C-alpha cells in the first residue's frame, strides 16, 4: 500500500484506522516544518515510534520518561559505547536497575506520547512505506491504538 498525502486532506485518525484495518506492516513518516516523526507498525499495531528531534535510544527514552535522572542518563550514555538497545536493556535488567516490565512500560508510554503529539499537527506531509521493519537492535512493544 503506497500511501502519501497531506494531513489537511487525510487526518491522522483516518491514517491510523486504515493501517490498522488493513493490518499493514511498515513505517509511517509524518513531516511538518518543525520536525519528522516515524511510526512503525506490525500487522496494523504500533510497535515503535521516534521523534526526529529526540534521543530515541533506550537510554534516551528512559530519561525522557523520567526513569533516569539527567546525571544517570549522562553516566550510562558515557559507558554504552555502541551497545544496542536490546543489549543495554538486558544489562539494566540483569543489574537490577529495571525490570523488563519497567522498560516495556516506559517504551509504550513514550511511543504513545509521540503518536498523541501527532494528533496536534494540523498540517504536514505523510507517507507510508509497506514492509519496512525497524532495525533488529531496537526494542519493540506491541500497542493497540
Image (tube, helix red, strand yellow):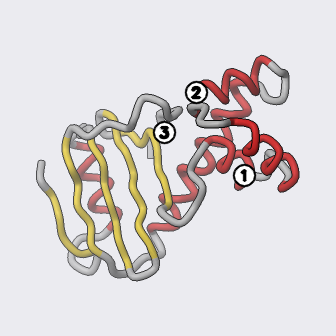
Residue 31 in the figure: left or right of residue 75:
left
Query: Nearest the camera: 18 or 4?
Result: 4
Label of residue 86 in the image: 2
Instruction: Looking at this view, name the residue that lies furthest to the left.
Output: 2
Residue drawn at point x = 75 percent, y = 22 percent:
93
Q: Residues within 10 Å of mark 3 (few under 14, many from 20)?
A: some
Q: Residues within 10 Å of mark 2 (few under 14, many from 20)?
A: some
Nearer the camera: disc 1 or disc 3: 1
Q: CA distance from mark 3 to mark 2?
A: 18 Å
Residue 86 in the figure: left or right of residue 118:
right
Residue 108 in percent (x, y) is at 59, 42
Label 2 or label 1, whichever comes before in sequence order: 1
Residue 49 in percent (x, y) is at 47, 50
Say which residue label 3 marks. 143
Residue drawn at point x = 26 percent, y = 38 percent:
25
Residue 142 vertical position relative to residue 27 in the rendered view, above or below:
above
Residue 95 in the figure: left or right of residue 100:
right
- Secondary element under disc 2, as helix, strand or loop, is helix
Residue 40 vertical position relative to residue 103 in the rendered view, above or below:
below
Say which residue label 1 marks. 65
Residue drawn at point x = 53 percent, y = 66 percent:
53
- Tell whether label 1 touches label 2 (CB within 8 Å): no
Residue 52 in percent (x, y) is at 47, 62
Amino acid at each position: 500500500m503506497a500511501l502519501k498525502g497531506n494531513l489537511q486532506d487525510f487526518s491522522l485518525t483516518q491514517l491510523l484506522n486504515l493501517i490498522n484495518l488493513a493490518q499493514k506492516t511498515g513505517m509511517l513518516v509524518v513531516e511538518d516544518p518543525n520536525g519528522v516523526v516515524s511510526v512503525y507498525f506490525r500487522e496494523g499495531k504500533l510497535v515503535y515510534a521516534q521523534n526526529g528531534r529526540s534521543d530515541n535510544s533506550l537510554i534516551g527514552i528512559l530519561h525522557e520518561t523520567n526513569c533516569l535522572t539527567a546525571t544517570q542518563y549522562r553516566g550510562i550514555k558515557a559507558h554504552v559505547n555502541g551497545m544496542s538497545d536490546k543489549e543495554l536493556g538486558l544489562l539494566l535488567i540483569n543489574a537490577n536497575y529495571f525490570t523488563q516490565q519497567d522498560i516495556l512500560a516506559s517504551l509504550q508510554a513514550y511511543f504513545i506520547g509521540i503518536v498523541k503529539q501527532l494528533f496536534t499537527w494540523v498540517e504536514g506531509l505523510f507517507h507510508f512505506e509497506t514492509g519496512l521493519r525497524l532495525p533488529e537492535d531496537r526494542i519493540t512493544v506491541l500497542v493497540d491504538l
